[in-house]
Amino acid sequence: MTTTHTPQAPYDRLKRAVASANSSGGVVSTNTARLLAAAIHEGPSTALGRFAASGDLNLPAATTELWDLPIDDVPADWWSALNHYFEAEADDA
């Protein structure tokens, strides 16, 4: 019998990473935060777009963009996870 392994969809991995961080009160990893930014940014020239593409984080601009996104455009748990990541980055600065 041959078992075929189907790679898990990136969306499912992202969803699980966010759920895990939210349930434990922790913060998502930088890679997960970048994937979240990639999923919700409004263009490559935005702070969220640059963070997603390069890891270069302009924290004040990215936080403002996150807070300015239309509430219905972003899953609440993704918004919360990215906001917690930004808060943790601000605390570390």
Image: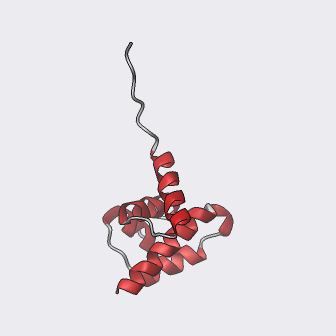
* Residue that sits furthest to the front in the current view: 24
Measuring from the top left, give residue 78's x and y in whole percent: 55, 63
Quadrant, the C terminus: bottom left
> Tell me, what colour scheme is on the image?
secondary structure
Q: Residue at x 52, y 62 (%)?
A: 40
Measuring from the top left, give residue 30's x and y in whole percent: 37, 66
Quadrant, the N terminus: top left
Q: Is residue 31 visible?
A: yes
Residue 8 falls left or right of residue 76? left
Measuring from the top left, give residue 19's x and y in whole percent: 54, 58
Q: Is residue 63 above or below residue 71?
A: below
Judging depth in this view, the residue of 20 and 15 nearest the camera is 20
Q: Can residue 46 be seen in this view?
A: no
Judging depth in this view, the residue of 38 and 76 nearest the camera is 76
Q: Residue at x 60, y 71 (%)?
A: 69
* Residue that sits furthest to the right in the current view: 72
Q: Residue at x 62, y 60 (%)?
A: 75
Count of number-bearing discs:
0
Q: In this view, does 2 lie above or below 12?
A: above
Residue 92 falls left or right of residue 41? left
Measuring from the top left, give residue 81's x and y in whole percent: 52, 67
